[in-house]
Image (cartoon, rainbow, N blue to C red):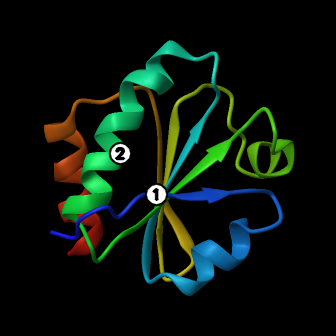
């Protein structure tokens, strides 16, 4: 477990670099006005500390519309799961931590 490891703030400009430089990554697409996003945020922060082999990022969809359009994000929160720079899963909704952990274990396998 890595102490004080936080998700990286991602923008339209830094998205591709973030996804391509990390073997496994998860991007949390959120907005400040979204209550489910605010519920999911501390869970993502915890997972970022517990899974040091996964890079976590947060993308504010209101401030970064290009990536939202590119990945067809119609609801938030949406999590984008990447492996070797390729999108392997996309999910919307604030899932509980144990459900996310199962998805992360699958992502790492």
Image x and y of residue 99, in percent: 19, 39
Q: Label 1: state its secondary structure.
A: loop
Query: Is 74 in front, or is 18?
Result: 18
What residue is at 61 percent from the left and 56 percent from the top? Answer: 9
* On screen, residue 92 above or below 101: above
Which mark is on residue 44? 2
Q: Label 2: state its secondary structure.
A: helix
Image x and y of residue 8, in percent: 54, 61
Which residue is identified by label 1?
7
Are discs 1 and 2 less than 8 Å apart at CB?
yes
Q: Residue furthest front?
A: 4
* On screen, residue 11 above or below 74: below
In the rendered image, the quadrant that contains the C terminus is: bottom left
Image x and y of residue 73, in percent: 68, 37
Q: Residues within 10 Å of mark 2 (few under 14, many from 20)?
A: many
What residue is at 78 percent from the left and 32 percent from the top? Answer: 62
Mark 1 or 2 closer to N-term?
A: 1
* On screen, residue 15 above or below 32: below
Q: CA distance from mark 1 to mark 2?
A: 8 Å
In the rendered image, the quadrant that contains the N terminus is: bottom left
């Amino acid at each position: 477990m890595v102490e004080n490891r936080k998700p990286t703030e991602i923008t339209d400009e830094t998205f591709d670099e973030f996804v391509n430089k990390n073997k496994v990554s998860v991007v949390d697409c959120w907005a400040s006005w979204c209550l489910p996003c605010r519920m999911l945020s501390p869970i993502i922060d915890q997972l970022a500390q517990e899974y040091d082999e996964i890079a976590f990022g947060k993308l504010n969809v209101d401030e970064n519309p290009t990536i939202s359009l590119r990945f067809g994000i119609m609801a938030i929160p949406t999590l984008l799961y990447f492996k070797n720079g390729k999108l392997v899963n996309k999910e919307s909704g604030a899932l509980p931590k144990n459900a996310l952990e199962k998805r992360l274990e699958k992502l790492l396998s």
